[in-house]
Image (cartoon, helix red, strand yellow):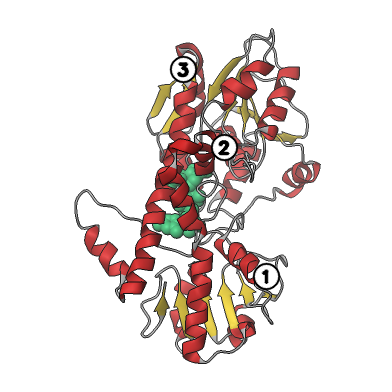
């Protein structure tokens, strides 16, 4: 079986590598020539546990990379699906462009699997009409892996495959079963699209509930973490953790697909998004309260630790720290906070430093935005500092929480 994976990003690359290292004949295609060159030359991958080793195994097994689409039996489209800020609907332009290119080259009988997260109905509305007279079969196989534990989850998470008929679904299942050891559920395409978006929306709403509780408990002078810890002892309660906001390209984006398509039916989903989007401003307010209490007069003595959207990854997309910095910029403060992230080597924002000790020396108020293990393993470095821990990772005396 020949497979062409389109889009060598956070999902497409590990998926292609995983298939190749399990004996599938795979070519990874990306329109970004620099990325393809880098993959071919030095195997440059993003930061993810075990990915470099998997890359070597896949190269050994014969994976190839190209900017060209290939003749294949199965195409897997794994390209970004942004949402349109104004209408809050999905912007399917990358999916549509990739599918068009597949249709130009593929033979009759090929299967086109969309793996990108899409809003329910996207395949019917945007992909099916492109097919014309071609005898191509469609499927949707949404991914579920979590950055930070991607490779383990690729193998061990159950998956969903939506297809128009049983034979197509079974063929796609056998491809994913080459590396996935968990249950693979077969369904129709629209149900697969909907269930994926629902999974991420569920998590967004649960986090929003935790964030709202954090605000209530702060106002009431109570410890939200203790409240949640106790509530979660109930066998049917499982509240997630409050934090400085929700980032990443999934949970902060997918719920908008439902709000965009069903604006009159989604007050809960919409509010949850708003609650999570309000958290950077809440952190700003907490910083101001603490600065007043500790007589820290300038933001230049405030240090934001962490630029990524969560711990121990290098992905900064939609990160709460970037949202907070944007907010600070709008406020035209006299000075900007110092920023540091051990996973971000390039200069992204003003006042960014690249050395932990330099960062600490410039900081009176240490704001932990991301719980990278670099710092959670060394809490003693903060013993003399004023600390705002937005992730509840430290149990130091006298530190501030959300
Ligand atoms: N966060 C909290 N509190 C929590 C958990 C997360 O504030 O209790 C924050 C994180 O810090 C981060 C954001 O939420 O900023 C999202 O992080 P995440 O770890 O919850 O999820 P993602 O975006 O890395 O991955 C999600 C996962 N979906 C679900 O768990 C339902 C993953 O399985 C999906 O594959 C992925 O979205 C995706 O690509 O759709």
**Residue 152, visible in the rendered structure:** no
Counting residues from the start of the chain, the first of labels 3 and 2 encountered is 2
Q: CA distance from mark 2 to mark 1?
A: 39 Å
Q: CA distance from mark 3 to mark 2?
A: 18 Å
| Secondary structure under the numbered disc 3 in the rendered image | helix
The quadrant in which residue 313 appears is bottom right
| Secondary structure under the numbered disc 1 in the rendered image | helix
Dot label at residue 170: 3
Crowding at dot 1, Cα within 10 Å, few <14 / some 14-19 / many 20+, comes out as few
The quadrant in which residue 106 appears is top right
Q: Residue at x 58, y 24 (%)?
A: 123
Residue 222 is left or right of residue 193, and the answer is left
Circle 2 is placed at which residue position?
Answer: 15
Q: Which quadrant, please, contains the C terminus?
A: bottom left
Crowding at dot 3, Cα within 10 Å, few <14 / some 14-19 / many 20+, comes out as some
| Secondary structure under the numbered disc 2 in the rendered image | helix
Residue 343 image point, x, y percent: 61, 64
Q: Residue at x 41, y 55 (%)?
A: 208
Circle 1 is placed at which residue position?
Answer: 329
Residue 244 image point, x, y percent: 48, 65
């Amino acid at each position: 079986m020949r497979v062409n994976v389109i889009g060598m990003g956070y999902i497409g690359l590990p998926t292609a590598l995983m298939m190749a290292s399990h004996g599938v004949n795979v070519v990874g295609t990306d329109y970004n020539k620099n990325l393809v060159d880098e993959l071919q030359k030095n195997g440059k991958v993003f930061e993810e546990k075990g990915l470099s080793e998997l890359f070597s195994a896949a190269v050994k097994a014969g994976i190839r990379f190209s900017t060209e689409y290939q003749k294949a039996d199965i195409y897997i489209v794994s390209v970004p699906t942004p949402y349109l800020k104004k209408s809050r609907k999905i912007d399917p332009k990358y999916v549509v462009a990739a599918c068009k290119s597949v249709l130009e080259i593929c033979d009759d009988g090929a299967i086109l699997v969309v793996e990108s997260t899409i809003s329910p109905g996207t395949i019917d509305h945007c992909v099916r009409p492109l097919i014309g007279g071609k005898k191509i079969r469609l499927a949707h196989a949404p991914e579920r892996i979590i950055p930070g534990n991607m490779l383990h989850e690729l193998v061990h998470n159950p998956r969903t495959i939506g297809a128009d008929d049983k034979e197509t679904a079974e063929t796609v299942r056998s491809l994913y079963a080459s590396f996935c050891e968990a249950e693979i559920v077969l369904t129709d395409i629209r149900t697969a699209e909907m269930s994926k978006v629902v999974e991420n929306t569920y998590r967004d709403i649960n986090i929003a509930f935790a964030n709202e509780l954090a605000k209530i408990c702060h106002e009431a002078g109570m410890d939200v973490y203790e409240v949640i810890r106790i509530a979660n002892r109930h066998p049917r309660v499982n509240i997630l953790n409050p934090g400085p906001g929700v980032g990443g390209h999934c949970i902060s984006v997918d719920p908008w697909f439902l709000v965009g398509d069903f604006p009159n039916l989604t007050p809960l989903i919409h509010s949850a998004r708003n609650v999570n989007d309000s958290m950077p401003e809440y952190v700003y307010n907490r910083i101001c309260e603490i600065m007043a209490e500790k007589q820290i007069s300038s933001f230049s003595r405030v240090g934001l630790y962490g630029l990524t959207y969560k711990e121990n990854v290098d992905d900064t997309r939609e990160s709460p720290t970037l949202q907070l910095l944007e907010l600070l910029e709008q406020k035209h403060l006299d000075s900007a906070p110092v920023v540091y992230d051990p996973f971000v080597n390039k200069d992204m924002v003003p006042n960014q430093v690249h050395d932990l000790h330099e960062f600490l020396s410039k900081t009176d108020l240490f704001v932990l935005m991301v719980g990278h293990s670099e710092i959670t393993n060394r809490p003693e470095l903060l013993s003399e500092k004023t600390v705002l821990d937005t992730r509840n990772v430290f149990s130091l005396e006298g530190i501030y929480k959300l």
